[in-house]
Image (cartoon, helix red, strand yellow):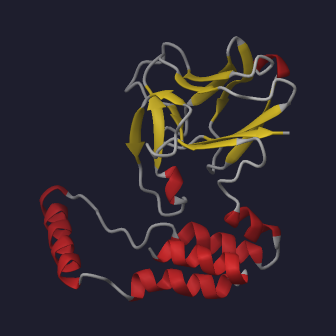
Amino acid sequence: MLEDEAMRKLRDTRDTGATADILDRAVQQSGAPEWRARIFELAEASFQSIGMQLSVPRYNGLWLERRFADSRTDPTETDSILNWTNPGPGGFYDDLGDPTRQPHLVRSSISLEYRPQWPKFWWTYAESFYDEPLQMRYTGLDPAAQYRTRVVYAGDSPGRKIRLMAGALEIHPLMLKPQPVRPVEFDIPHAATAQGELNLSWYREAGLGGNGRGCEVAEVWLIKK
């Protein structure tokens, strides 16, 4: 994949300009042109019949381009891009929209929402419905350590509030999901991990009704301080 090639280039050279050139090839060069033509035929037919808009210029390019631009004035941005999924020593990372990278997720539904201004790991996310919590469980933690969680609240319910609990302990009360979407961090009380385990539960506002959505989480880091 071109994105993988771009990230290898960034690791080797830290040259954001050359990396951006690789991403541009996703637009300038198209593989399997006969498949691409057929896909555009089907997309146009869908637009004409039901108004569905399926044009996707490229996967992660817009988000990465903004980060590359920021890195020209803030060199730490490059480290942030390269280490995005790294929770540090003794930590854990889950991409809740990827079934292969969510080892601590208890159960949930997975949804997709394409937004080109977001990185692709925010397009898919785990969610629970109505008053059911979204839950994660960690074992094998250091009982003596202090932990912190970093969370991305994505989804298509930006006006909804969400609450995070660690067992019976509140990590944060009901809060509006940050807009624009971005990672937010919260300390975990030591009492919640003192037995070497941690249970996290997210809730939306109780009894809200509607379509049942609002408890939507894209990424979770558990960071050992």
Camera-nearest residue between 82 and 112: 82
Q: Residue at x 76, y 74 (%)?
A: 71
Kindly tell me whether residue 204 is visible in this rendering.
Answer: yes
Kindly tell me whether residue 156 is visible in this rendering.
Answer: no
Residue sitting at the far front: 140
Seen in the image, is 164 located left or right of residue 58?
right
Camera-nearest residue between 166 and 56: 166
Residue 47 higher or lower than 71, as above or below: above
Q: Quadrant of the N terminus?
A: bottom left
Q: Quadrant of the C terminus?
A: top right
* Place of residue 63 in the rendered image (x, y in percent of width and height, measured from the top left): 58, 66
Q: Residue at x 32, y 68 (%)?
A: 55
Picture quadrant where residue 135 is located = top right
Seen in the image, is 129 located left or right of residue 150?
left
Q: Residue at x 74, y 22 (%)?
A: 196
* Place of residue 173 in the rendered image (x, y in percent of width and height, measured from the top left): 71, 22
* Place of residue 4 in the rendered image (x, y in percent of width and height, measured from the top left): 52, 72
Camera-nearest residue between 19 and 176: 19
Label count reads: 0
Q: Residue at x 53, y 14 (%)?
A: 206
Picture quadrant where residue 85 is located = bottom right
* Place of residue 2 in the rendered image (x, y in percent of width and height, measured from the top left): 47, 77
Picture quadrant where residue 222 is located = top right
Residue 75 higher or lower than 99, as above or below: below
Camera-nearest residue between 176 and 197: 197
